[in-house]
C-alpha cells in the first residue's frame, strides 16, 4: 500500500469525524434504512468501511461536510474582501453608510 500525504491523512481524519458525527446525530436507524442493512452493520462500518471511505475520499481530493455548509471559491471571497475594504476606506463617517454615498 502506498503512503499518503500528511494533507490527505488530515483530511481523512476530518472526513471520518464528519461521518461519525453525522451518524451520531441522526442515529443508526435512518442510515441503516438508507443503506438497506441492519443497524448492527452500520455500527460495524464505523470501524471498517467508514475509515476506508474517508481515506479514499481524501485521496481523491474530496472532503465530507454537512449538507447545509456552503462552498465559496477563495478567489471570489478575496475579491469581495478587497471591494469591501476599498469602500470602507472611502467612508469617514457612519452616516455615509446610511446615505448610500
Image (cartoon, rainbow, N blue to C red):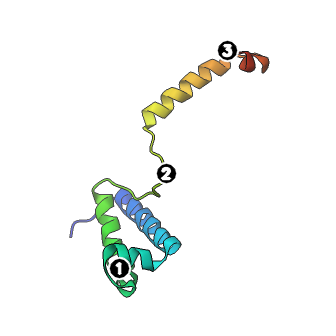
7 is higher (above) or lower (below) than 39:
above
Badge 3 or badge 2: first in the primary sequence:
2
Instruction: Residue lying at the far left in this picture: please name it.
Output: 1
Residue hosting label 1: 45
Q: Is residue 51 left or right of residue 77?
A: left
Other residues around mark 2 within 10 Å, as few (<14) / some (14–19) / many (≥20): few
Element class at badge 3? loop
Mark 2, residue position: 69
Q: State the image coordinates of residue 24 (x, y, percent, origin top left).
A: 50, 74
Q: Where is residue 97 in the image (x, y as percent from the top left)?
A: 72, 20
Bin the neighbour count of mark 3 within 10 Å (Cα to Cα): few under 14, some 14-19, many 20 and up: few
Front residue of 67 and 29: 29
Tag 1 secondary structure: helix
- Total number of numbered discs in the rendering: 3
Q: How far apart are marks 1 and 2 (CA)?
A: 25 Å
Residue 3 horizontal/vertical position (percent): 26, 65
Task: Give the alpha-carbon distance from disc 1 to disc 3, as whole Å.
Answer: 57 Å
Label 3 to label 2, Cα distance in Å? Answer: 33 Å
| Mark 3 lies on residue | 90
Q: Which of marks 1 and 3 is nearer the N terminus?
A: 1
Amino acid at each position: 500500500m502506498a503512503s499518503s500525504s500528511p494533507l490527505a491523512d488530515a483530511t481523512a481524519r476530518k472526513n471520518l469525524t464528519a461521518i461519525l458525527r453525522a451518524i451520531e446525530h441522526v442515529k443508526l436507524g435512518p442510515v441503516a434504512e438508507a443503506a438497506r442493512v441492519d443497524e448492527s452493520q452500520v455500527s460495524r462500518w464505523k470501524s471498517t468501511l467508514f475509515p476506508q471511505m474517508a481515506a479514499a475520499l481524501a485521496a481523491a481530493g474530496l472532503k465530507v461536510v454537512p449538507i447545509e455548509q456552503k462552498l465559496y471559491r477563495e478567489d471570489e471571497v478575496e475579491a469581495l474582501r478587497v471591494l469591501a475594504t476599498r469602500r470602507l476606506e472611502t467612508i469617514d463617517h457612519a452616516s455615509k453608510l446610511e446615505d448610500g454615498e
